Amino acid sequence: MSDELLALTAAEQAKRIESGDVSAAEAFEYWRGRAAGDELGSYLWVAEETPEDAGTLPPVAVKDLFCVEGVPSMAGSRILEGYRPPYTATSVRNLQDAGARVLGKTNQDEFAMGSSNENSGFGPVENPWDRTRVPGGSSGGSAAAVAAGTAPWAIGTDTGGSIRQPASLCGIVGMKPTYGAVSRYGMIAFASSLDQCGPLTRDVTDAAILLRHLQGRDPCDSTSLGIPGEIPLPSAERLDGLRFGIWGMEEAGLEPGVADAVNATLAKVEELGGGVEQIELPNAKHGIAAYYVIAPAEASANLARYDGVRYGPRSGNGDLTSLYEQTRHDGFGEEVKRRIMIGTYALSSGYYEAYYGTAQKVRTRIAQDFAAAFEGVDFVVSPTSATVAFKLGERTADPLAMYLSDYYTVPMPLAGIPAISIPGGLSEGLPVGIQLAGPAFSENKIFEASYALEQAIGWKETPWRR
Ligand code: GLN
């Protein structure tokens, strides 16, 4: 298969497959070759062969933490090395039912904890735009693979920004749906009240198609609802009558080049007939503080199951306590241990109200801020990340600096609402992401608006055409 597929979006490839120009098996084989040739560390596993039934859609790259039957699924952690689940996550199963086969498992920060993919137990991922820089995290492998053209499209998870931030840093589209839109069954858990699966794609149309197939109520996940109604292909050309509330442009850490790209996008919003106004989310600045209590608290409970008995490798000999201790000592990376300690501390008797209780109150306030904002505007717009892709190693020594990478993305999952990141331009030759958030279940509206903007921006940049 020639490189002609590389230039096409997944939707365009699906049409070629449907028309019989290309067979699904040829497409799979082509992408399998691309994935196997990846040099960025994007993949932890690539399909060994083309499936007999290659489906009807281009294959999809899947973040490592999605359980896929018989396929290594380790959530980027050494503690799950060699684990091959006996079942497949509902989200992945839905894609398979729709005709997309699993191309490979993508690298990620261990248990999705990170913003740079440097916390993976299996080595970092390099950003295809500049291999000395991070792709973002924790879905860094999925983002790098789509941006580098080693996958036609991909899925990831977002707990505090892990779809949108890497999408932003790699110059692609990433969408975090409303909490409950997509089943979490079979997704190796980080923080269950925040985790949500979503698409990482070349463009908005591909994201809409992928979400159409991913979403749905699942009896195996009692928090899942699906998205009411259909997800049509977005087609809007104008933004007339829509109001965009800008948030976060005054922050000290915002790079001037990022601000310029956001402002240029806001000018496009107005050209297309949309209204732009400043809004306040008074409590959003406390998002990071609340998130870094709530997410570690939930993680400390979710990660208790990795004990050397039920999954993966086992260390230690002698008594049971030393088996648990040694296994967890050897199997978990530093960041995961840090979070387990923060989480268990925050939940401990006597401190629970002061930390966890307070963080939950902040969470409610942030949700109320968004609700109030959406009485006046249709979307909240902001940068996705305050900076373009940073250098590998730049923030690893300082966990707090790393945590601040998620300043703009953490409030939305705390409020449970959907948000997309689309490429808005370049700063210093690196992609800048624009974030659009809307009320719960406004996915279609977000797709329509971001599609119109995408056409106006005319983003054609890819690292591989250079
Ligand atoms: N970077 C954030 C964290 O480290 C968010 C990660 C995520 O969304 N999974 O927790």
Image: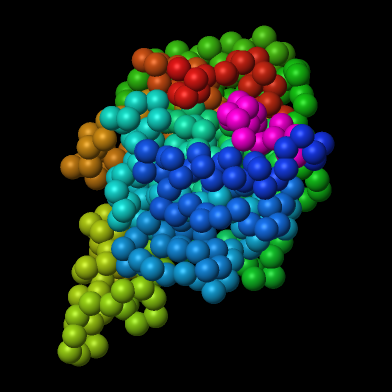
The front one of 63 and 49 is: 49
Q: Which residue is situated farthest in the front direction here?
A: 1
Considering only vertical position in the picture, is 184 above or below 23? below
> Where residue 364 sits: x, y (%)?
51, 51
- Tell whether 383 sits left or right of 270: left
Considering only vertical position in the picture, is 206 above or below 330? above
* Residue at the (36%, 15%) spot, across then down: 428
What colouring does the structure picture have?
rainbow
- Tell whether 169 sits left or right of 317: right
- Tell whether 459 sits left or right of 161: right
Please tell me in which quadrant of the rendered image residue 452 appears: top right
The front one of 421 and 86 is: 86
> Where residue 42 sits: x, y (%)?
41, 43
> Where residue 273 sits: x, y (%)?
72, 13
Please tell me in which quadrant of the rendered image residue 217 appears: bottom right
- Tell whether 327 sits left or right of 183: left
Residues in magenta? 1-17
